[in-house]
Amino acid sequence: MAPPTLPAPKLTISHSPLTPSSFHPFGTAISKPLPQSLNRTPPPSSLPSLANTNPTTTPDFPVPTLANQSTALKYSPISTFQNNYDQSKSADGGMGKAGEPRMSMFSCFPRQLRRGGRERGRKAKAGGGLFDVGILERHPYTTQTFVPLGVPGPAERRRQGTSSASTVRDDKRQGTSTSTGIKDDDYGTDDNTPPASYLVIVAPSLHGQKVEATVFNPEGRNETVVVRDPPDLRNLKAFVAHGGQAVTYGAGTWHAPMVVVGRHRVDFVVVQFSNGVAEDDCQEVVFGDGLVVDVDVDVDVREKEAYEDECSKL
């Protein structure tokens, strides 16, 4: 059966950077904790100061420990891994089917953006457009973590040309940390930063509420169904993440399927629990026109148009 259709407000939102603090109500944002310039194992005495070397990490990021014969730093835990399938009542007899750990690969291709929004009136080298949010989903009994792989490296970035947005330096990050001796001007803002970006679009749940929705049944007729704990669409949020960040959606968090923006595909390793019961593993709702994200990211429009031309010839 097709997903139920919910009424949606006319709403256009802007995105903000993905950070652990801003994303905390919806799950966990994971960023590298160390500057790119640190390439030697630090002394044990400096480990407490390395929990928060990156200013984009949360204050409670764990203090690392030495591992692998003192050739690595281990940060643990950095994200939740939740299995609530024992709460499911969908199976016969009222007992939920147990969830099992599942690791998948999602190869996500760049999305088509509509012209408009903040993109209008800009020069050719600008990123943006309008993304229509037509569907949200949730995994009611499991967290779901997306870890990007295969993002373009420095050579590919130089071929594309370094963008103005990714070369801006925060003066506060210039110099050397007095406590660690680490040059801390690299937190994903130099030529080593993967240019791939993706949108993380989420909505809070209206816990304890019910809303009527329309579904197109197998007989070809519309019928009314009830969606419990529906998404709070008026408080829809969007975050932009670069290819060096991972994200964990909390169990039951309403979110859009992965939205890659730019020219390049991004491959994600996805880790979650699953029991093979469709209603337990994933619940979806769809909308008509009205929910829009005004995208303004670092994308070369000319390259995007060339990519679209290539796709049209396939």
Image (cartoon, helix red, strand yellow):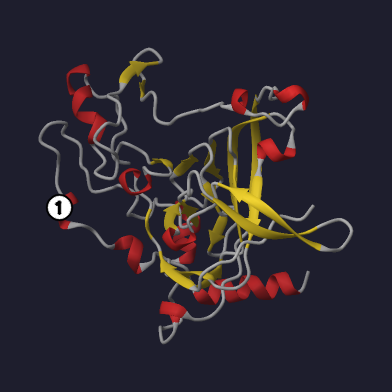
Compared to residue 19, the image places residue 90 above or below, namely above
Left or right relative to 283: residue 39: left
Q: Quadrant of residue 72?
A: top left
Q: Position of residue 307 (x, y in %)?
A: 63, 70
Where disc 1 sits, the SS reads: helix
Disc 1 marks which amino acid?
Answer: Lys
Q: Quadrant of residue 36?
A: top left
Mark 1 surroundings: few (<14), some (14-19) or many (≥20) residues within 10 A: few
| Residue in the foreground of this view, choosing between 284 and 120 | 284
User: At x 48% / y 56%, what residue is drawn?
Assistant: 232
| Residue in the foreground of this view, choosing between 96 and 58 | 96
Query: Furthest residue to the right?
Result: 219
User: At x 57% / y 64%, what residue is drawn?
Assistant: 133
Q: Which quadrant holds the C terminus?
A: bottom right
Q: Position of residue 271 (x, y in %)?
A: 58, 33
Left or right relative to 30: residue 210: right
Residue under label 1, please give it: 172
Q: Position of residue 202 (x, y in %)?
A: 48, 53
User: At x 55% / y 43%, what residue is drawn?
Assistant: 149
